Amino acid sequence: MPNTPHKRWRATAQVQARARQLRREMTPAEKKLWQRTRNGQMDGAHIRKQHAVGRFIVDFFCAKAKLVIEIDGDVHADANQAAYDAERTQWLNEQRDYRVIRFTNDNVLHNIDAVLEKIREALRK
């Protein structure tokens, strides 16, 4: 059964494949944050990158803290994208009881220490 998805996965095979692709093609801001959050660097928290949750793929995810970390580029300023982001955040909050925190690409690239501190605070809650 090597092609059978793990029972915990609630995402379709297509969403899983897209998540794998996004893990290989991370943005510069995502790469920078990943370098500082991987391997338990955030007080031992296990953080995943480009993780499929239902029909969505979140940038970063900590299951134990029920925390989703999103990195928003310029496209997120678009009204249609903002509406999609709001719908997605609502679904994650209501259906999965996850907390979502967002940072801009610029914030991650130019103020990483402040971003990391906000993530640490969210992990402690």
Image (tube, grey):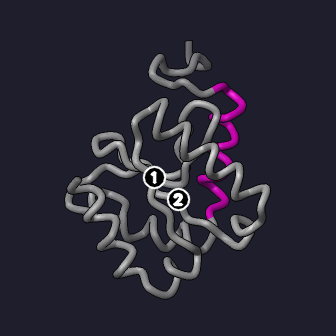
Q: Quadrant of residue 24?
A: bottom right
Above or below: residue 29 compared with residue 51: below
Residue 16 magenta: yes
Res 121 quadrant in image: bottom left
Location of residue 115 with respect to 44 vertically, above or below: below
Q: Quadrant of residue 30?
A: bottom right
Which x, y percent locates residue 27?
63, 68
The numbered dot on residue 100 is: 1
Query: Mark 1 and mark 2 in contact (Cβ < 8 Å)?
Result: yes
Pinpoint residue 33: horizontal percent, then vertical percent: 45, 69
> Which comes before the other along the chain, label 2 or label 1?
2
Residue at 71% x, 52% y is: 83
List the residue tagged with mark 2. Answer: 70
The x, y position of residue 79, in whole percent, is 77, 61
- 25 versus 86 height, above or below: below
71 horizontally vs 87: left or right:
left
**Predominant SS of the magenta segment:** helix
> Which residue is at a point 40% across and 48% down the rendered structure image?
99
Indicate the amino acid at tag 2.
Glu
Helix, strand or loop at label 1? It is: strand
Is residue 125 placed above or below 120 in the rendered structure? above
Disc 2 secondary structure class: strand
For the N terminus, the image quarter is top right
* Most foreground residue, 125 or 22: 125
State the residue in front, 91 or 51. 91
Q: Which region of the structure is painted magenta?
A: 12-26
Is-magenta flag for residue 87? no
